[in-house]
Image (cartoon, rainbow, N blue to C red):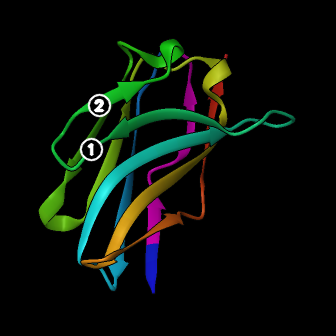
Amino acid sequence: QVQLVESGGGLVQAGGSLRLSCAASGNIFSINRMAWYRQAPGKQRELVATITSGGSTNYLDSVKGRFTIARDNAKNTVYLQMNSLKPEDTAVYYCNADVRVVPTTTRNYWGQGAQVTVSS
């Protein structure tokens, strides 16, 4: 079994910054793609940022230049640095990872979610 535990959410004023962390633990051989999603009230979950095991990144257009995804492979941890936050960034943020539990088997896991609230 694999667990993804998120931390770092909270309440911040518009223009402020927050850093989310997501640590994976359990039966891990290696981790491929890691990502952050978010879901605002009444809206569908959307992909915010992804990072491959080699460090290649992609971002949702609306967060480009403000958010940075990074990972520490030695710690099986992914981060999301969020700067210049806007009220429309308010959502529950979820960590997601493609975990190779044995060399021939990859499974997808979700974190429990972290609330980010940006006040105007």
Image quarter (top left, top right, bottom left or bottom right) of the N terminus: bottom left
Examine the rendered structure and indicate whether residue 76 appears above or below residue 58.
Answer: below
Q: Is residue 111 magenta?
A: no
Image quarter (top left, top right, bottom left or bottom right) of the C terminus: top right
Residue type, mark 1 in image: Thr
Helix, strand or loop at disc 2?
A: strand
Q: Position of residue 86 (x, y in %)?
A: 58, 17
| Residue that numbered label 2 is attached to | 57
- Mark 2 or 1 closer to N-term? 1
Q: Residue at x 37, y 50 (%)?
A: 34
Using a 10 Å C-alpha cutoff, classify the residue at mark 2 as few (fewer than 14 neighbours), some (14 to 19) or many (20 or more): some
Q: State the residue in front, 15 or 106.
A: 106
Q: Are marks 2 and 1 in contact (CB under 8 Å)?
A: yes
Q: Position of residue 25 (x, y in %)?
A: 34, 78
Examine the rendered structure and indicate whether residue 63 appears above or below residue 47.
Answer: above
Q: Position of residue 90 (x, y in %)?
A: 66, 31
Q: Residue at x 38, y 38 (%)?
A: 50
| Residue that numbered label 1 is attached to | 52
Examine the rendered structure and indicate whether residue 63 appears above or below residue 71.
Answer: above
Residue 19, picture quadrant: top left
Residue 92, picture quadrant: top right
Q: Residue at x 61, y 25 (%)?
A: 89
Using a 10 Å C-alpha cutoff, classify the residue at mark 1 as few (fewer than 14 neighbours), some (14 to 19) or many (20 or more): some
Q: Which residues are magenta?
A: 4-14
Q: Position of residue 55 (x, y in %)?
A: 18, 39
Q: State the residue in front, 114 or 100.
A: 100
Separation of residues labelled 2 and 1 (CA atoms)? 7 Å
Q: Is residue 113 left or right of residue 95?
A: right
Q: Main secondary structure of the magenta part?
A: strand
Q: State the residue in front, 67 or 45.
A: 45
Helix, strand or loop at disc 1?
A: loop
